Amino acid sequence: AKGARRVIMRKEDGEFKSYFITRKDTGIRELKDLKGKTFSFGSVSSTSGHLMPRYYLLKAGINPEKDFSKFSFSGAHDATAAWVEAGRVDAGALNFLVWDKLVETKKVDTGKAVIFWTTPPYVDYVWTVRAGLNKALVEKISKAFLKLDYNKPEDKKLLDLHRTKGYVAAKDSDWKGTEEAAIAAGLVK
C-alpha cells in the first residue's frame, strides 16, 4: 500500500474465507447455478462480503452485472444471511466467521440456509502504520503485539477483545491474491 506499511495481523486473518449461502429449496449447488438468480453481497467495501466473492464469481465466468437477474448489497454479513434465509434473495456471500457465529448462536436456521461454496483462503484485515513512521517505533509496536500470549490471563483479555488467539507479522507477499482481486474488480490499477 502506498503511503502505508503492513505490520501485523490476527492469525485468523491469514486464512480468511467467504461462504456462499443459499436456501435448500433453490436448487443452487455450485457457482454456475447462480446465473439468472438474485444475489446479495454484504457491504460494497467489504473484502469478505464483496471483493473476494466478486473475484471468485468472475473467475467462475459469472459477471454479477450481466448474469444475475438482480444483485444488491445488504450492508452487513448478518443481513445477507437473513435475506437469504427469508427468501429476499436466492443466494449471498458473507464472512465465514460471521456465519459461524450466527450458527453457533442459532440466529440462522441451517435447516433453511446452507453453505454451497467456500472461497479458497485469502488474507484479510491488517494493522498498518503510516509511511515514514520511525522504524524503531514500528518495531516496538510490532513486538508488543507479537509477544501477546493467549495462555497469560492479562494477554487473553486483550486478545479476546480483538477476537483472536494471537498476532503474526504481515508480509506484503501475502496480499498478492487480494490485490489481484481488487484489480480484477476495477478498484485499483
Image (tube, rainbow, N blue to C red):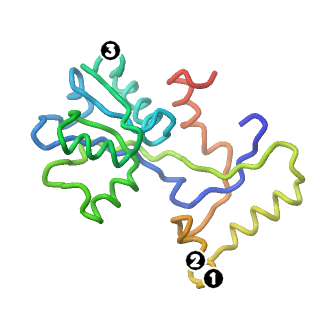
* First in residue order: circle 3 vs circle 2: 3
Mark 1 Cα shell of 10 Å, populated few (<14), some (14-19), many (≥20): few
Q: Amino acid at mark 1?
A: Glu
Q: Look at mark 2 in the image and give the residue it sits on.
A: 157
* First in residue order: circle 1 vs circle 3: 3
Mark 3 Cα shell of 10 Å, populated few (<14), some (14-19), many (≥20): few
Find the distance from the CA under tag 1 to the CA under tag 3.
52 Å
Q: Amino acid at mark 2?
A: Lys
Q: Secondary structure at mark 2?
A: helix
Which residue is painted at 71% across and 48% down in the image? 6
Left or right? Give the position of 128 relative to 12. Answer: right
Left or right? Give the position of 103 relative to 150. Answer: left
Verify CB contact (< 8 Å) between mark 2 and mark 1: yes
Where is residue 142 drawn, in percent x and y?
75, 62
Q: Secondary structure at mark 3?
A: helix
Q: Secondary structure at mark 1?
A: helix
Q: Look at mark 3 in the image and give the residue it sits on.
A: 66
Which residue is painted at 49% across and 53% down in the image? 15
Where is residue 179 drawn, in percent x and y?
59, 33
Q: Look at mark 1 in the image and give the residue it sits on.
A: 154
The quarter of the image holding the N terminus is top right
Which residue is painted at 88% across and 44% down in the image? 132
Find the distance from the CA under tag 3 to the CA under tag 2.
47 Å
Mark 2 Cα shell of 10 Å, populated few (<14), some (14-19), many (≥20): few
Which residue is painted at 62% across and 64% down in the image? 167
| Rendered view: 113 above or below 26 | below
Left or right? Give the position of 40 relative to 13. Answer: left
Residue 130 - label: none
